[in-house]
Amino acid sequence: MAKQKSMTIAYQVGKNLYLNLTNRCPCACTFCIRNNSDSAYGSDPLWLEHEPDWDEIHSVLESEDVSKYHEVVFCGFGEPTERLDMVLRTAAYLKTRGVISIRLNTNGLADLIHGKKTAELFKGLIDTVSVSLNAGTAKGYLEVTRPKYGEEAYTAMQEFAKDCKNYVPNVMFSVVDVLSEEELEASKQVAENCGIPLRIRALD
Ligand code: SF4
């Protein structure tokens, strides 16, 4: 079936405002919502007709009372850090508009995407980074996440998350609640070894 496209840059989820800046992603997660839907949480389609430029993003956010939201979250139909510069620019703008809490939901592969360490760039701009751990073993991670970078992705994702602890007030890992008991226990152990809390979230 053909994908439904739109220019949904911002959409409300509960008390939060979610931002959708790209459809690019280096992963092909087996559980990705994009496999079965064109939208999330009742939003308009999240497949973008094109990646919004700054003027388009600015225009949408200018018309919003962004400070009324509990949290503004970079999380759409793709990996936000594929557009790292735009995430940083948007976060800086949101801070000038009085947004207290900004979260980045990420697969944690920004360092591989950009070929450099990236965590420091979030200092003072991003308040929470939620990294998809997805599995407790490299083998399980590759099976579920299917990153184009192969095996090095599992380690790089954990290193990124640990780096973020130096620059971002809140860092967490997440897994979805469809993991086997064994994989879940292994995930808890990995999170503990990294010194990062693990959030077990329901599959959307
Ligand atoms: S990292 Fe996120 S957007 Fe990318 S395939 Fe996995 S669930 Fe989908």
Image (cartoon, helix red, strand yellow):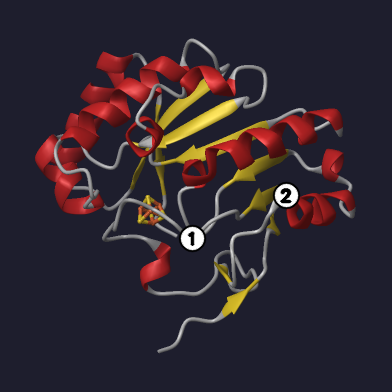
Give the residue at the far left of this rendering. 139
Q: Is residue 172 left or right of residue 19?
A: left
Q: Give the labeled residue for mark 1.
A: 23
- Residue displayed at 47% across by 55% down: 78
Q: Which labelled disc corresponds to residue 54?
A: 2
Displayed-image quarter of ligand 1: bottom left
Towards the viewer: 83 or 156: 83
Per the image, label 2 sits on a secondary structure element best described as helix
Q: Is residue 14 above or below residue 45?
A: above
Left or right, 90 with respect to 137, comes to right
* x and y percentages locating residue 84 in the rendered image: 54, 38
Q: Measured along the vertical axis of the image, is residue 146 above or below residue 3?
A: above
Q: Is residue 148 above or below residue 161?
A: below
Taking the spot 57% from the left edge, 67% from the top edge, the residue there is 46
What's the distance in space between the residues labelled 2 and 1, CA to CA? 16 Å
Residue 60 at least partly seen? yes
Residue 112: give x, y in percent of width and height: 32, 34
Asked if the residue under mark 1 is in contact with the one under mark 2, i.e. CB atoms within 8 Å, the reply is no
First in residue order: circle 2 vs circle 1: 1
Is residue 73 left or right of 119 when viewed as pictured? right
- Asked which quadrant contains residue 185, the reply is top left
